[in-house]
Image: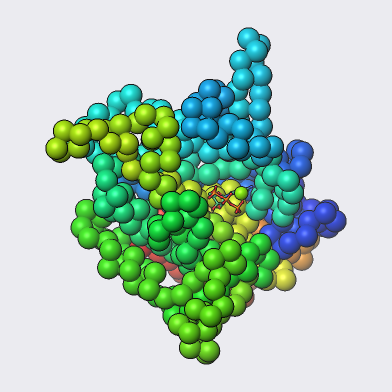
Amino acid sequence: MRLSRYFLPTLKEPPREAEIVSHRLMLRAGMIRQESAGIYSWLPLGHKVMRKIERIVREEQDRAGFVEMLMPTIQPADLWRASGRYEDYGKEMLRICDRHEREMLYGPTNEEMVTDILRVSVRSYRDLPKLVYHIQWKFRDEVRPRFGVMRGREFLMKDAYSFDVDKEAARRSYNRQFVAYLRTFERLGLKAIPMAAESGPIGGDMSHEFIILAETGESAVYCDRALVDMPVPGADIDYEGDLSPIVEAWTARYAATDDKYDAARFAAEVPAERRVTARGIEVGHIFYFGTKYSEPMGALVQTSDGSQVAGEMGSYGIGVSRLVAAIIEASHDEAGIIWPEAVAPFKVGLINLKSGDAATDKACEDLYGRLAKAGIEVLYDDSEERAGAKFTSMDLIGLPWQLIVGPRGLAAGEVEIKQRASGERVTLTPDAAIAKLAGRGNAGNTGI
Ligand code: ATP
Ligand code: MG
């Protein structure tokens, strides 16, 4: 992509309302634009990152045996009356009236709709488990939308749902998501720690929030440092096999957010040198809620002994749009964003140090064409800006590699490559530069 044809409205100064670094950087890098409190347009660069995150989320959901579908954003109020949540949800729900005076709402989540879909078509334990997900916009009229897309009102969520015949089977479905989340966040370049979360009236141990540690996180968290270094299952993990040893290993060590925090247990179970007290950002939540919706909504299945029972269900959310900001919180420096390769909007930023100089333009065109041919995504800064300004904006938007081409280097048969994360620069021939950029792994795209 040529910068001259792209739409990248970068800002020199971030608007004053941006309180946290990811919000400032997203605005400065021209990734988003606020349209109204907590509601954003996703400009091309932001949109590209969000799509890459979505793709990794999707690949890991598919791998875990969940099937993609798509439910609408607008739902009828009656569905929510059937579950008893229409009144309970309160002001966070955006209620809409259509032209026939029918009460509708913009979905804040989809448990009711999924339950309704499954109840009419799933009859027998033989049809189970049913494991589905979708990636769809949600609306929650948050009291305090803030921190940009981190806590928006309209946001993109991956929400998955499982429907099983009994609790034991429901636990197997829960474990699938647990492992899928470990893999998803690792592929996104994040260290997300599953932490025991509120399980509501159902109780039990099947509610975990996946939290990344960051100073700007909204919740206080407490965990055992051993979790930070724990290895994540590889792509060859067998989701049809027994996943409980993995889940047990990850849940055997102490980790809790403030609502579940127990100071005495934390002190007793974690040696002082391994106690981590930090702040965290919730990027996902997995939750077993039993028959909370299936019972009132009559989603029944026949068991092997012929009796009818309400389906045992769970729901599993990932904040896809929140992740764009969360990744920036975890990966930036003073100069700007540092994208992990797997979600970078482009892998390489090609910088022409002297646009208008025939030899430099020609060399850049040639490199641009060859990189594209090698299947590498390049953003080519072909603008007339000064070299200094080009460096600044390339650092700001955080592409993993910069390929720097100027007349002086070319005269010596050389170009420069800079790695954004380390700042390390190497000088090499154009051929060697292409080989180096093409040779780097594409781990994020193929699964690690
Ligand atoms: P929170 O406690 O942050 O409000 P929640 O418990 O309401 O989150 P869930 O209903 O479990 O969240 O939603 C699943 C995921 O969706 C969350 O883990 C989070 O990543 C994301 N999410 C929730 N609310 C928002 C929001 N207002 N803006 C962006 N992402 C959100
Ligand atoms: Mg919430």
Q: Nearer the viewer, residue 227 or 352?
A: 227
Q: Residue at x 77, y 66 (%)?
A: 388
- Where 408 sits versus 235, above or below? below
How far from the left and from the top, in percent, is residue 89? 61, 38
Q: Residue at x 37, y 29 (%)?
A: 298
How far from the left and from the top, in percent, is residue 377? 51, 52
| Camera sees residue 305 | yes
The extreme left residue here reads: 305
Q: Residue at x 32, y 36 (%)?
A: 310
Report whether 369 appears left or right of 313: right
Q: Nearer the viewer, residue 340 or 125?
A: 125
Q: Nearer the viewer, residue 152 or 234?
A: 152
Q: Nearer the viewer, residue 345 or 36?
A: 36
| Camera sees residue 45 | no
How far from the left and from the top, in percent, is residue 16? 85, 56
Residue 344: name its quadrant.
bottom right
